[in-house]
Image (cartoon, helix red, strand yellow):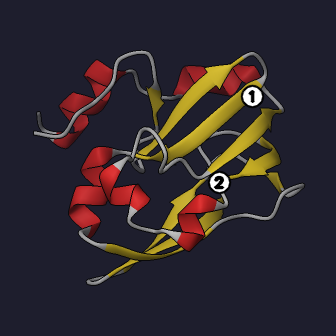
Amino acid sequence: MSEIPAGLKYAKSHEWVRVEGDTATIGITDHAQAELTDVVFVELPAKGRQLKAGESCAVVESVKTASDIYSPLSGEVVEVNEAVPENPALVNTEPFGGGWFFKLKLADPGELGALLDAEAYQAQIGG
């Protein structure tokens, strides 16, 4: 069974969000990386890019498929994890740690209310 840390928020499209102040760190869940299998390429959004909640902003390619990654929240990309494009396997080995994708300065913290908590996400993926 996939690990689903409490204290994070989750999008139905399998991204996770860790909020610290007005900044959100975003990556994909353990469930998502397990479905993708071995990740071989990651394209992240450019620093400074303005994203809207639900907008496609990154791409993950695995040995079996390519998947769009959607921003769960609106805001400006203030940091990207440069280690991930150089070592895409981090997405598989550390989905909630070193495999994070990008950080957003939140435009509307109220959007967090639309995301799932760990229990609701677990129910969505059938755990």
The numbered mark at residue 114 is: none
Give the left or right position of residue 30, taking residue 90 as reference: left
The numbered mark at residue 81 is: 2
Q: Position of residue 111 (x, y in %)?
A: 66, 27
User: Which residue shows up at 42% across the image and 50% down it?
Assistant: 13
User: Which residue shows up at 72% across the image and 64% down it?
Assistant: 45
Give the left or right position of residue 70, taking residue 57 as reference: left
Amino acid type for the residue under numbered disc 1: Thr
Mark nearest the camera among 2 and 1 is 2
Tell me: residue 100, above or below residue 108: below
Foreground pick, 100 / 87: 87
Q: Secondary structure at mark 2?
A: loop
Quadrant of the rendered image containing residue 40: bottom left
Foreground pick, 74 / 31: 31
Q: Position of residue 56 (x, y in %)?
A: 62, 64
Give the left or right position of residue 87, taking residue 74 as reference: left
* Other-residue count near label 1 (Cα within 10 Å), few / some / many at <14 / 14–19 / ≥20: some
Amino acid type for the residue under numbered disc 2: Asn
Q: Position of residue 38 (x, y in %)?
A: 28, 72
Give the left or right position of residue 8, taking residue 37 as reference: right
Q: Which residue is mark 1?
A: 23
Q: Position of residue 124 (x, y in %)?
A: 24, 37
Going from N to C along the chain, the mark reached first, 2 or 1, is 1
Where's the N terminus, which quadrant?
top left
* Other-residue count near label 2 (Cα within 10 Å), few / some / many at <14 / 14–19 / ≥20: some
User: Which residue shows up at 47% across the image and 26% down it?
Assistant: 9
Q: Secondary structure at mark 1?
A: strand
